[in-house]
């Protein structure tokens, strides 16, 4: 003890060694403290990725529900009776079955997204693109090219205006007694009251003469020609004015206005269906692309 006390050099060396050891220990303790700060950040990032993926998954599933509702509507809602003459009920069933396939494929890909993310995207895109193509055809986006697509406006117009098809269609309209029902509902109405009455496109085009003919109203299916109206005067609408007859078996069933009315009824239905197919296919395509990106991010970049 005395020797150490009398040796200041040894004491200073020991103090320096202790200081070095303490500094080393402090230096070694710093990295764990920094990594402990980074750990919550990594956990928060992983949690955020999972929340985003879960939200997109739920969104994709919810977007498929309107497709299921449209399937029920297509398979169980009865169309206009005379549509069967144009094979439209078969098309209605075919689209319903195809939409059921899209619904199942879409949700299967969502369920198996973690296992087949790339293959699943490819599989679901094929029916969605076909769905988009069919929808564009039904809204007449292709014009002349959609003439071959059953149910498209161009196809419907071509069939309705063909005499061989129209003969069957007008017989179907006549057998439905639509004009007789209109006459029964309009008994006792004055001309102004009848003019203010809202008629369906078929009632307006088939059961009464065109407005341009300026005939005098007697009842819903009987109209008297005005004295100033000449036949074959060359004005627009003369063809329908000449075609009109007060005979209940004839009326305006051969008028262009009658064909236009029938065409409007069925075209509106299929145009709305086409618009629905376009919107739903685009939304599902975007949703599945986002789900694919989020899944890849979760698997390779977010962990």
Image (cartoon, grey):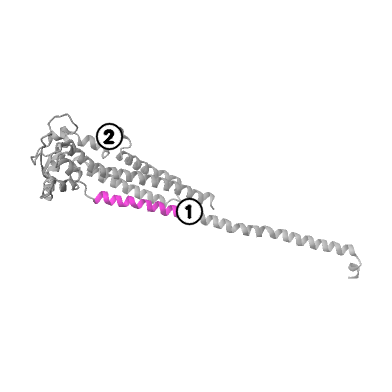
Q: Residue at x 78, y 60 (%)?
A: 20
Total numbered badges shown on the rendered structure: 2
Quadrant including the N terminus: bottom right
Does the magenta segment cover residue 221? no
The one nearer the camera, 40 or 162, is 162
Q: Which residue is mark 1?
A: 52
Classified by dominant secondary structure, the portion drawn in magenta counts as: helix
Q: Is residue 248 above or below residue 302?
A: above
Does the magenta segment cover residue 61? yes
C-beta proximity under 8 Å, tags 1 and 2: no
Quadrant location of residue 269?
A: top left
Q: Residue at x 44, y 46 (%)?
A: 289
* The disc label shown at residue 66, or none: none
The one nearer the camera, 20 or 208, is 208
Does dot 1 land on a helix, a strand or a loop?
helix
For the view shown, which residue lies furthest in the bottom direction? 1
**Mark nearer the N terminus (1 vs 2):** 1
Please state the horizontal and vertical placement of residue 127, each as a whole percent of the image. Answer: 36, 43
Q: Which residue is mark 2?
A: 147
Q: Is residue 183 left or right of residue 119?
A: left
Q: Is residue 147 left or right of residue 225?
A: right
Please state the horizontal and vertical placement of residue 188, each as a whole percent of the image. Answer: 10, 50
Q: Residue at x 57, y 56 (%)?
A: 42
Q: Is residue 103 left or right of residue 55?
A: left
**Mark 2 Cα-neighbour bin, 10 Å: few <14, some 14–19, many ≥20:** some
The one nearer the camera, 25 or 168, is 168
Please state the horizontal and vertical placement of residue 189, each as a whole percent of the image. Answer: 12, 49
**Mark 1 Cα-neighbour bin, 10 Å: few <14, some 14–19, many ≥20:** some
Stretch in magenta? 53-76
For the view shown, which residue lies furthest in the left direction? 247
For the view shown, which residue lies furthest in the front direction? 228
Does dot 2 land on a helix, a strand or a loop?
helix
């Amino acid at each position: 003890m005395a020797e150490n006390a009398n040796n200041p050099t040894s004491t200073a060396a020991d103090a320096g060694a202790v200081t070095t050891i303490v500094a080393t220990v402090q230096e070694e303790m710093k990295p764990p403290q920094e990594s402990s700060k980074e750990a919550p950040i990594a956990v928060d990032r992983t949690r955020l990725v999972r929340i985003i993926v879960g939200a997109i998954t739920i969104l994709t599933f919810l977007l498929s529900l309107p497709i299921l509702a449209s399937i029920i509507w297509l398979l169980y809602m009865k169309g206009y009776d005379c549509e069967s003459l144009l094979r439209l009920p078969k098309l209605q069933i075919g689209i319903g079955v195809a939409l059921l396939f899209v619904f199942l494929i879409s949700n299967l890909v969502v369920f198996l997204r973690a296992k087949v993310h790339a293959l699943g995207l490819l599989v679901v895109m094929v029916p969605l693109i076909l769905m988009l193509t069919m929808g564009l055809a039904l809204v007449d986006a292709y014009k002349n090219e959609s003439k071959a697509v059953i149910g498209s406006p161009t196809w419907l117009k071509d069939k309705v205006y063909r005499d061989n098809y129209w003969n069957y269609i007008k017989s179907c309209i006549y057998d439905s007694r639509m004009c007789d029902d209109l006459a029964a509902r309009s008994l006792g109405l004055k001309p102004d009251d009848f003019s203010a009455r809202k008629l369906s496109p078929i009632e307006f085009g088939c059961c009464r003469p065109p407005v341009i003919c300026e005939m005098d109203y007697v009842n819903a299916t009987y109209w008297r020609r005005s004295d100033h109206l000449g036949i074959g005067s060359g004005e627009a609408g003369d063809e329908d004015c000449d075609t009109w007859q007060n005979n209940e078996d004839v009326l305006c069933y051969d008028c262009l206005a009658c064909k236009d009315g029938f065409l409007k009824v069925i075209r509106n239905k299929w145009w709305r269906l086409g618009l629905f197919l376009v919107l739903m296919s685009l939304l599902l395509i975007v949703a599945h692309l986002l789900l694919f990106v989020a899944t890849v991010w979760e698997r390779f970049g977010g962990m």
